[in-house]
Image: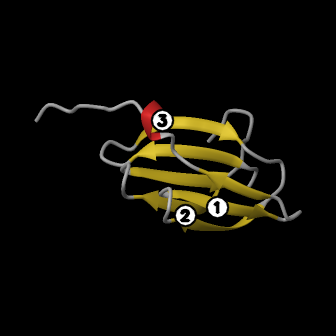
Amino acid sequence: MAPDAIGDFPVLMQVSPKFGLVFIITKLGYFFMYETSRAALIYRQRVTDQLIFVSVRNKATDGMICVNKVGQVFAINVEEQNLVKFVMAA
């Protein structure tokens, strides 16, 4: 978890099969993006200071749509052209 968020914990998770990513949102509003084959953290950002209580996979973008407790709607998507391609040697 984030160093400034002691006691924070995951509340939502979505998988992005197209990109091989897992999206996690915590109780304190942090968004984490992990690469699935190595469980490597790719990105971390606080997206809200309110609890996000529901999320759904966005099939059109392979991202996620979330709603927090005050009604804000968040669309979290991967910009494919900015995604760094990782190559693993077998």
Q: Which residue is mark 3?
A: 42
How many C-alpha atoms fall within 10 Å of the one at disc 2: few (<14), some, or many (≥20)? some
Residue 65, numbered label = 1
Q: CA distance from mark 2 to mark 3?
A: 20 Å
Q: CA distance from mark 1 to mark 3?
A: 19 Å
Residue 85, position as x, y percentages in the image: 33, 32
- The kind of residue tagged 3 is Ile
Circle 2/circle 3 CB separation < 8 Å: no
Residue 90, position as x, y percentages in the image: 10, 36
- The kind of residue tagged 2 is Asn
Residue 72, position as x, y percentages in the image: 82, 59
Q: Nearer the viewer, residue 71 or 89?
A: 71
User: What's the residue at 83%, 48% (across, down)?
Assistant: 49
**Disc 2, SS:** strand
Q: Which residue is mark 2?
A: 58
Q: CA distance from mark 1 to mark 2?
A: 6 Å
In the figure, is residue 21 to the left or right of 9?
A: left
- The kind of residue tagged 1 is Ile
